[in-house]
Image (cartoon, rainbow, N blue to C red):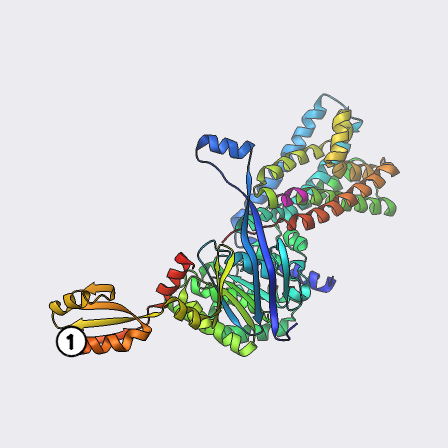
């Protein structure tokens, strides 16, 4: 085994047996008396290797199998087939030594005690992980400073804002100093500032502790800010595993050329050049041009037209990934 | 298993539960009234049964009151520990928050069984003890050390059977998701435990001693107090409680393999 490798999945599959129901009263009665289960393969023969200290993003549409993979990784689900090793452990055995090394944070579920201040949940978690009170106190102080929550530790969870609650959830999940973090949509529902703060924290945490982070998110900013490597999942299959930059170049071989012309007549003429048009709005036109043709096209346009402004840019990441999630080629 | 750690965690479970419960003062007052009215109603019902007969199944009213006292204590234990925790399993499974329990280095059965405590059940335990002491007085009973030991032993077994029944039913939530009705059926069966075993017909006696050993739970400790329990009955209760505890543990471990976690 490679010394640096912390996560290894070989031919991992997972199936669920799900009952489907036809509409109407007849369907309901059939569903009650003679329920039919269909096997649904959610994860199909996936192979993944992750090195210690990496931040890896899982990309995929809803129902692609990202969360199922994450749950297999942290031992919540038994894989139907295949080999899995995390830091030398089989996650589904849920050995205490393994559980001490990992943590799971889910944006849509919470572990904090709703009616009590987060500090009570922190000390409870510390006791579960066998951390002495004095040590827990130090750890809470360190993490609360890093997360910038101090006063909120003593307010009932139900009184906290979503952003504050998520920070407290993170603190509760990190109290035992785990070196592998599984994050399932951690920024779900947070406002832009809260999202940015959380991303900054995770990056800092990874840098300072050398922990490995696996992340799923529908917010592309989470992925582009944190992950150099992404794994794309489509219908339970890994469709891409590599650098994010490479994926973006692969998916978007064209640049956007936005031109503001002095006259509408020029816009009409530009439309007839035979280039791909992304958008036309009054005196502005956005063209999509192959990266290798950009010089030639620019030269041609600059010679021929009188321009007010010109801008060359890459298509937005959200748009590229959105295309990936719908096409999946 | 690190016992010291588990004690520490249990202490914190109690602290957090009590803190939550004490947030709602009126609730505690209502529970106190419910416990008093519930006990008064049960004693009244028992007195109606005995108004036309001197004894039922060989038990006088004063003796049957011991069963009522034991039932009240056990019902208090159910309401303090079993009911708040084991009905919560449904919530853990429906909402998928069992995930957080399973990824912690702590026994999941310990967590789901002892996380919550409802202090209002203490009122029932206290009322049951008061009635029991009164029964000692009206039946002219003085407990010797060996009888006290047997009483505690049989009570321990009764609590184990009661816990296992609750836990076995709650565990089925992993497959069926909603099992509120099943726990309600169990609750209504538990009412049977207020009456002496001999007051039922033979087939019912067999059913309530083996399939759902409700009458064991209250009858045997009561017989120990009265000094009329036979040796084989005590051995049988120990055996039944051990089987139930082992079965509930094995069933939980088996059921977890089928836990599919709520989708997100």
SS for dot 1? helix
**Closest to the observer, A271 or A133:** A271
- For the question of whether residue A100 can be seen, the reply is yes
- For the question of whether residue A307 can be seen, the reply is no
Vertically, is A154 above or below B49?
A: below
Residue projecting furthest to the top: B52
How far across and down, in percent of the image, does residue B258 sit? 63, 48
How far across and down, in percent of the image, does residue B154 sit? 80, 43
How far across and down, in percent of the image, does residue A262 sit? 13, 73
Name the quadrant containing residue A225: bottom left
- Mark 1 residue crowding within 10 angstroms, few (<14) / some (14–19) / many (20+): few
Vertically, is B221 above or below A149?
A: above
Magenta stretch: dominant secondary structure: helix
Q: Is residue A15 left or right of residue A293?
A: right
**Closest to the observer, B127 or A29:** A29
Question: Which quadrant, please, contains the C terminus of chain A?
Answer: bottom left
Name the quadrant containing residue B40: top right
Residue at 19% across, 75% down: A301
Residue at 49% across, 33% down: A28
Question: Which quadrant, please, contains the N terminus of chain A?
Answer: bottom right
Marks counted in the figure total 1
Residue at 43% across, 33% down: A24
How far across and down, in percent of the image, does residue A289 sit? 29, 70
Query: Callout 1: residue from which chain?
Result: A
Q: Is residue A319 left or right of residue A132?
A: left
Vertically, is A197 above or below A156?
A: below
Which residues, given as a range, are shown in magenta? B168-172
Q: Is residue B165 left or right of residue A280?
A: right
Tag 1 residue? A304
Whether residue A39 is in magenta: the answer is no
């Amino acid at each position: 085994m490679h010394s640096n490798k912390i996560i290894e999945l070989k031919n991992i599959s997972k199936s669920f047996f799900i009952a489907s129901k036809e509409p109407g009263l007849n369907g309901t009665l059939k569903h009650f008396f003679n329920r039919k289960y269909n096997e649904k393969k959610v994860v199909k023969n996936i192979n993944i290797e992750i090195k210690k200290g990496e931040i890896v993003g899982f990309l995929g549409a809803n129902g692609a199998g990202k969360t199922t993979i994450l749950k297999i990784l942290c031992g919540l689900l038994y894989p139907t087939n295949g080999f899995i090793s995390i830091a030398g452990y089989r996650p589904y055995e849920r050995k205490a030594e393994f559980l001490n090394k990992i943590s799971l944070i889910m944006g849509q579920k919470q572990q904090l005690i709703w009616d009590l201040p987060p500090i009570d949940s922190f000390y409870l978690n510390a006791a579960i992980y066998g951390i002495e009170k004095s040590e827990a106190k130090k750890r809470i102080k360190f993490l609360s400073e890093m997360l910038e929550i101090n006063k909120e530790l003593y307010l009932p969870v139900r009184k906290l804002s979503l952003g504050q609650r998520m920070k407290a959830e993170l603190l509760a999940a990190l109290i035992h100093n785990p070196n592998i973090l599984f994050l399932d949509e951690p920024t779900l529902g947070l406002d832009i500032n809260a999202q940015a703060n959380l991303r900054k924290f995770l990056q800092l945490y990874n840098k300072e502790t050398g922990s490995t982070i696996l992340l799923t998110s529908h917010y592309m900013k989470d992925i582009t800010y944190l992950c150099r490597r992404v794994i794309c999942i489509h219908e339970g299959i890994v469709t891409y595993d590599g650098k994010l930059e490479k994926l973006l170049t692969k998916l978007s071989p064209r640049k956007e050329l936005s031109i503001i012309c002095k006259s509408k007549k020029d816009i009409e003429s530009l439309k007839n050049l035979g280039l791909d048009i992304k958008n036309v709005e009054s005196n502005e036109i956005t063209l999509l041009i192959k990266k290798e043709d950009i010089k030639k096209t620019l030269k041609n346009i600059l010679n021929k037209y009188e321009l007010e402004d010109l801008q060359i840019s890459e298509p937005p990441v959200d748009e590229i990934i959105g295309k990936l999630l719908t096409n999946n080629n | 298993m690190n016992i010291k750690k588990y004690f520490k965690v249990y202490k914190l479970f109690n602290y957090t539960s009590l803190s939550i419960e004490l947030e709602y003062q009126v609730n505690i007052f209502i529970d106190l009234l419910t416990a008093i009215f519930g006990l008064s109603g049960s004693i009244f019902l028992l007195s109606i049964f005995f108004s036309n007969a001197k004894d039922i199944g060989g038990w006088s009213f004063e003796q049957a009151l011991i069963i009522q006292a034991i039932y009240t204590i056990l019902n208090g234990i159910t309401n303090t520990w079993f009911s708040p925790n084991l009905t919560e399993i449904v919530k853990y499974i429906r909402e998928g928050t069992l995930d957080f329990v399973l990824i912690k280095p702590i026994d999941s059965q310990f967590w789901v069984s002892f996380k919550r405590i409802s202090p209002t059940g203490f009122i029932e335990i206290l009322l049951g003890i008061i009635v029991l002491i009164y029964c000692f007085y009206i039946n002219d009973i003085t407990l010797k050390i060996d009888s006290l030991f047997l009483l505690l032993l049989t009570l321990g077994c009764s609590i184990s059977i009661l816990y296992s029944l609750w836990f076995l039913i709650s565990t089925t939530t992993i497959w069926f998701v909603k099992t509120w009705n099943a726990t309600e059926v169990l609750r209504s069966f538990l009412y049977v435990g207020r009456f002496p075993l001999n007051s039922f017909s033979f087939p019912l006696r067999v059913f309530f001693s083996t399939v759902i050993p409700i009458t064991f739970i209250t009858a045997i400790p009561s017989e120990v107090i009265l000094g009329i329990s036979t040796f084989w009955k005590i051995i049988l209760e120990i055996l039944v409680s051990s089987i139930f505890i082992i079965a509930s543990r094995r069933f939980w471990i088996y059921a977890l393999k089928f836990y599919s976690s709520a989708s997100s």
